[in-house]
Amino acid sequence: MHYFIGDLGHLFVIASLVTSLISAFAYWKANATSLETKDQWLINARIAFYLHSVAVLGVVISLFVIIYQHYFEYHYAYSHSSLHLPGEYMISCFWEGQEGSFLLWIFWQALIGIFLINTQRNWEAPVMVVFGLVQAFLASMILGVVIPLINIKLGSSPFILLRDAIDDPIFKLQPDFIPKDGSGLNPLLQNYWMVIHPPTLFLGFALTLPPFAFCIAGLWQKKYSEWIKPALPWALLGAAILGLGILMGGYWAYETLNFGGYWNWDPVENAVYVPWLILIASIHTMIIYKNSLTALKSSIILNIAVFVLILYSTFLTRSGILGDASVHSFTDLGLSGQLLIYMLFFTVAAIILAIIRWKEIPTSEKEASIYSREFWIFLGATTLCLMGFQVLLPTSIPVYNSFIELFGGESNLAPPADQIGFYSRFQLWFGVLVALISGTGQFFWWKRMEKEKLIKEIIPPILISLVVFAIIILIAKVYEPSYLVLTLAGVYLIVSNLKVLASVTKVNASLSGGALAHIGVGMMLIGVLFSSGYSKVVSLNNTGMLISKDLPTEFNRDNLLLFVNEPRTMAGYEIEFLGERVEPRNVNGYVSKNDIDLTLDPYKVIARKDIEFKGKKILNAKDTFEINPENTFYEIELRKNGEVAALLFPRVQINPAMGGFIASPDIKRNISRDLYTHVSLPMNREEEPEWSELEEVRVRINQQFFVNDYVAVLEDVTRIYEYEGFTFTDEDVAVKAKIKVTGERDSYYAEPVFVIKDKTQVGRISSEVNDLGVKITLLNIHPETNEFSLGLNTRQKDWVIIKAMEKPLINILWLGTGVLMVGFSMALVRRFREFKKTSS
Amino acid sequence: MKKSHIIAIVVIAACIGIIIATAGDASTYVSFDQAYQMASTGNKTQIHVVGDLKKDAQGNIIGLEKSQDNLSFSFLLLDESGKEQKVYYNEPMPPDFARSEKIVVIGGYQNNTFLANKILLKCPSKYQEEKINAGV
């Protein structure tokens, strides 16, 4: 038992909580006291925050040591990792659990805090009060301390011992029991995106704190407009990182999950999408605050809203309130009360502060003209807010139910049955509005423009858009009215911003961030529209059939049943299932399950023969290599006009501890469309297949016979002295037959064994050729005629059921994301320089 | 009237529209009887029914039928009021289906049978360890 590291970690957690509170208090005093004592308090506060950061680092290192050293006496290591987990996924273990992800969040905010302390001397004290308080709330989530007297447990510690976390009888018998292996990381998370997606997302979460903190500091210190300058670069960075994090999540889902897309409108996804939209809206109002006092007020409201929505999203995903509504929220750690207090504290405090100061915030009665930048930005920000509101409202349905039940009522409201259809129907039109508004609004990028000038500017892009639009619909055959409108709006957004980009670049290239970002959005809209709107199932069995005599409707089936080596046609391809494969850990490629021998260690197998993959030899016969026994890959060949177009290897993971069966797709990527294939149902190897009745044949060496319609030949019978670790004596007779069965593509060997032990006991070990559905038993030897009796059983051939989809133009979406990120970065650099100039 | 007022009115109208649409499109958790009633009055909205698989005294599942080609299956579901209903699903049976504790079916009645468009499974130990595998 390694008690020390856990105790140390726990101590660090407590220290981080205490120091964050001290730091907040000291910064508070620094604001409140006279100038002489101010410096003293500032120094104290800084020391406290640095100590806090050291403590946070200490917690991170302690937890990582526990995971990395496989200390399975700790619940965190036991439930999130295992001995066989590859090194890079140890990092994912760290944030698989709620506690680890809170820790990640705290860690990022500590880093940002240190950065602010060193760069924002003017704002340091008030801003860091907010930081200290937020850090304290977050640290309390992983505190794991029972408060005496009231007996309430505060937070859930990652350093809890297994025996304290799980009530298992073994701990009564053996309190020092340590499991030899952990239960492993959820296979879905064993993906490189899961190594980088959570840190990116939580960095995005953490980056929403500085704008909020500056806003609160501005209200508090009555610097009603000065806070925007330092807040804006942070908001931009936050929007870029959070957006990137969300899209990485989408990309991970596309590559790993099998719902067939990158976005599912699941409550957990919505919970981060909404704050991101509002963050974008706030950036826009912050950009125009100088010319519009209304924008100043909106900026204050929106900045508060973003942070509150981040807290609300945390509450939704971690309190367990989503329950049935979401497929991938965290498990409930009993933190709901604490999370609610966290959210309400900052919501109420920020709103009260804003109300107190509201009258003092400068205001004006002047209205923005239609031909001004402010007007269009406003319109855009309002649209973004409505867009967020439309998603937030239904996502919160489980909250209404809980709320009504809290007051003794009863509510049976469920989220919309067809989530994707429901949200897309609305978001599509908001997308159109956003595209039209930002396409037009960008023309006012530097100044007011009069009506005539605007018309002159705007006509060419409109004409070009119409032409491009006409070409697209001719090629892509878009007929759906709403899709037509969105395509046109998206094209207009891109074209008009290209024009703006061209003119801006002439003036000053560093200002082109906005235009680029908007082009990225336009590309994303078009990419989303085509890849989702025109995603089609290509594994369709459009024969139409009754699934039951009770149901009169004929149904098409989206799945395709493939027998091994029996080609079918699909989406213009000839498709053929070639068999089940395993993936060697240290070699690139896949190995047929027929070509390996298992060993006692499920993670190690031996190659039966030299193994080639795509014409290259990857393993020698008798090589022992490592595999992950959970994973099976289904090799599927796609041919076009007789030529191999692609080899796909969709994966199935069987992990009973994590809910059994998990299928991940394989994607054939083309420039214009992706072909996305996943396994819907594999054969169940644990279920004993139905074998035909035994058929007996008598053959000599080198004599051909038929089994399951395949040609087979008995090549050889040899005496053996050892079999799977069992040694025979001279008294025993053990022989192994070698039978070659020729399949459609490959030859297979069956090697049944016949044993006479101690002259009386007869044993027969049959041999199966999985792919062909054949089992051969050496029944008897007839020395008098040199013949051998073979028993033949056959079954249905191996099969797999797959589903395949086509996703057109999905690459435009990924490309658009890249363009958006470049745009953000350029805007960020520009705003940061602006801020530097004013503060120096 | 000022422009800002017009915008405010449009925004409020949009909000109300969104609320109404959400209320209209929100599904409900109902029992099979309620679902049947809804369907027979011509209400075609998809609903959620929460239930358990029918099991015999030994805990074996009763009434699970796969189609010949494995591409679809049907099962008997007992809703929370205990009413039994045969449910059809036009997808292969999820491999962890038989192990699941609670099942939410989203769909509706067609004639006298319930056709599920989507099935949500609640597995007992998904993502959460309740017993230690002491053998390892």
Image (cartoon, coloured by chain):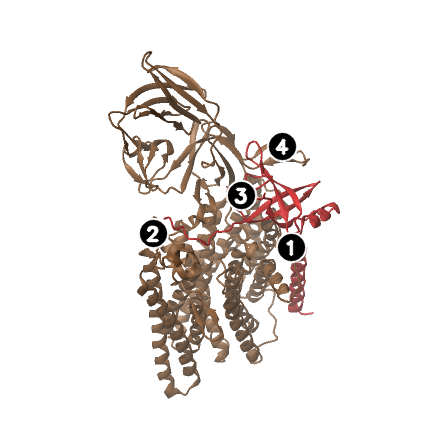
Q: CA distance from mark 3 to mark 1?
A: 29 Å
What's the mark number on residue A322? none
Where is residue A107? Give x, y as percent: 38, 65
Closer to the camera, A303 or A202? A202
Q: Residues within 10 Å of mark 1 (few under 14, many from 20)?
A: many
Q: CA distance from mark 4 to mark 2?
A: 52 Å
What's the mark number on residue B26? 1
The chain letter under disc 1 is: B
Residue type, numbered disc 1 = Ala
Q: Residues within 10 Å of mark 3 (few under 14, many from 20)?
A: some
Q: Colour of chain B?
A: red
The N terminus of chain A: image quadrant: bottom left
Q: Can you tell which of label 2 and label 1 is closer to the viewer?
A: 2
Residue on which the image places disc 3? B98
Q: Are marks 4 and 2 on the same chain?
A: yes
Residue on which the image places disc 4? A545
**Is there any visible trace of residue A784 in the rendered image?**
yes
Residue type, numbered disc 4 = Met
Residue type, numbered disc 2 = Lys
Q: Are marks 4 and 2 in contact (CB under 8 Å)?
A: no
Q: Are marks 2 and 1 on the same chain?
A: no
Residue on which the image places disc 2? A180
The C terminus of chain A: image quadrant: bottom left
**In the rendered image, which quarter is residue A590 located in?**
top left
Residue at screen point 61% across, 71% down: A367
User: Element under label 4?
Assistant: strand
